[in-house]
Image (cartoon, coloured by chain):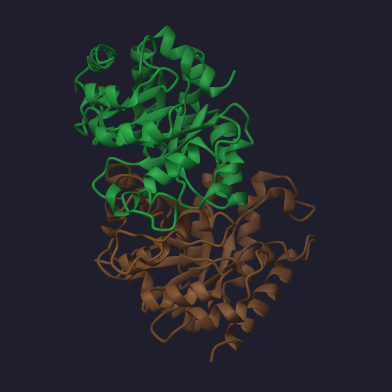
Chain colours: A green, B brown
């Protein structure tokens, strides 16, 4: 069972393009847990239980665990997701990027220690910094391509004089990921929801890659425009929402509110399918 | 006491441009520890004790700890370095790169949890992915610029059509780091030792930034050429060696052999000063 197989299975079973991002911030937890980093697992597990039939993937962001010395809670959460929602793949959002030998250690962390099905990576150091992850056959790797943050322009949107056709840097990455770098069909791309025209451009250059699209929800991306720009038959999208689901309500009803927010987002995304 | 102050102090006190990289691989430990990830702290602490009067900085690479669930050992090692060699700054090599809110969590991990004096970062997501680290006044941040791995060319060496003077991508980063991004004097650059001409180019564009230069030693960079290309009065360099020091000998004499290797490298670097 490869990552792509799992993704397609979960997307079909849950009729969903929604990726639920797990960015736990203890200061935003409901009152009974607020500020208590020892409750990261409990909080996230409740979100997982409330949304497991609505998501095509879960995406824990490792910084939110590491900042609180909560790697053990992330391990327990990974095990919980596997037990509760074995059909839903887990993307470990880590944006690692390093030389071969070190990349091998990071791959071991993501795939062996945490048992992730896919990981997010930075392409800045080139193909040999990606290759060690691809040695884990069947696992997925999403490369940063065009990010939705204000500084995403600073490098990604620069035009390259030295590449055929003078693509923008992010366009060059999309081509590499669809073509020569995708040696075993394991690559996807991260494209922010802020600019639908750029999602469409990436989709043109990378017609079959799964696109992980953050920026809908709290970051303000338009869900329907995102689906129209990015989704194709044979070209799946994972539209991530984190804060708008996790912190949909601040009281004891947080899990129910998270479920309602996830359901509404899933349905909004589905309604935008042609 | 800022990172730059610490660096200058250690470089003067230890008469050193050598950064000792801590990339613990249990399979390469001496026989009595071999293969035992619980000995990561003991191994690294012995290296620190053997080289604390020879280094201008220590650089633990976090992947080598995280792959073995050894964050607790990294915490102990950080405390040990602070106690044993309080004058030697510690660069946490993590190459993080993420949007603002997540970057804030990674900064908390590096500076609050581990107490690092500086961190390595990827500039791929732009300035707002760097800014949260600069909120820790006095801490340092080394941005990836021109890396020494084979794939370093793939993106970093592309020429930009859309920037004045059509610099290569790595030249553009060097200018940003020396200029508009260096809002509080906290930035440095990572430049591989493999290509001295490119170190010299970066030094021309970034005359005062500290340059962290890996690739001497096991990776084959020329130490003397590196110093001539990168070191200037008011423009310090940290020349990193990891494996050639850590694994200088495979028996019980490993710490003494590491000291001898560090001493020889330090002296080779110093001899290359004009």
Residue A263 appears left or right of B154: left
Residue B103 appears left or right of B43: left
B159 or A215, nearer to the observer: B159
Q: Give the answer, above or below, for where A272 lies relative to A63.
A: above
Residue B113 appears left or right of B32: left
> Is residue B114 in sight in this rendering?
yes
- The quadrant holding residue A222 is top left
B187 or A221, nearer to the observer: A221
- Numbered disc total: 0
Q: Give the answer, above or below, for where B200 lies relative to B119.
A: below
B258 or B199, nearer to the observer: B199
Q: Give the answer, above or below, for where B153 lies relative to A54.
A: below
Q: Position of residue B214 (x, y in %)?
A: 55, 66
Q: Position of residue A74 (x, y in %)?
A: 46, 30
Picture residue at 27% right of the left edge, 70% below the top: B179
- If the image is split into quadrants, where does the N terminus of chain B sit? bottom left
- The quadrant holding residue B170 is bottom left
Q: Give the answer, above or below, for where A234 lies relative to B253.
A: above
Residue at the extreme front of the image, as rendered: A165
Residue at the extreme top of the image, as rendered: A13
Q: Position of residue A47 (x, y in %)?
A: 34, 19
Q: Position of residue A104 (x, y in %)?
A: 61, 44
- The quadrant holding residue B219 is bottom right
> Is residue A73 in sight in this rendering?
no
Residue at the extreme bottom of the image, as rendered: B274
A176 or A23, nearer to the observer: A176
């Amino acid at each position: 069972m490869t990552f792509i197989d799992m993704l397609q299975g979960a997307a079909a079973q849950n009729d969903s393009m929604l990726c639920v991002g797990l960015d736990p911030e203890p200061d935003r937890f409901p009152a009974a847990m607020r500020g208590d980093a020892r409750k990261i697992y409990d909080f996230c597990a409740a979100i997982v239980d409330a949304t497991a039939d609505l998501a095509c993937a879960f995406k824990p962001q490792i910084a939110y665990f590491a900042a609180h010395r909560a790697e053990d809670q992330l391990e327990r959460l990974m095990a919980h997701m596997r037990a509760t929602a074995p059909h839903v793949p887990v993307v470990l959002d880590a944006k690692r990027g390093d030389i071969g030998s070190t990349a091998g250690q990071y791959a071991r962390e993501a795939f062996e220690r945490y048992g992730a099905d896919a990981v997010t990576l930075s392409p800045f150091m080139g193909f040999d910094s990606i290759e060690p992850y691809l040695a884990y056959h069947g696992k997925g790797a999403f490369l940063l391509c065009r990010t939705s943050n204000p500084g995403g322009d600073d490098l990604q949107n620069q035009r390259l004089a030295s590449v055929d056709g003078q693509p923008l840097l992010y366009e060059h990455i999309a081509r590499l990921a669809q073509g020569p770098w995708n040696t075993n069909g394991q690559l996807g791309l991260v494209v922010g929801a802020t600019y639908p025209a750029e999602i469409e451009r990436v989709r043109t250059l990378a017609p079959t890659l799964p696109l992980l699209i953050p920026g809908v929800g709290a970051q303000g991306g338009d869900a329907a425009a995102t689906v129209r720009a990015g989704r194709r038959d044979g070209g799946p999208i994972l539209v991530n929402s984190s804060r708008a689901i996790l912190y949909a309500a601040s009281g004891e009803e947080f899990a129910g509110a998270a479920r309602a927010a996830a359901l509404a987002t899933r349905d909004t995304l589905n309604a935008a399918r042609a």
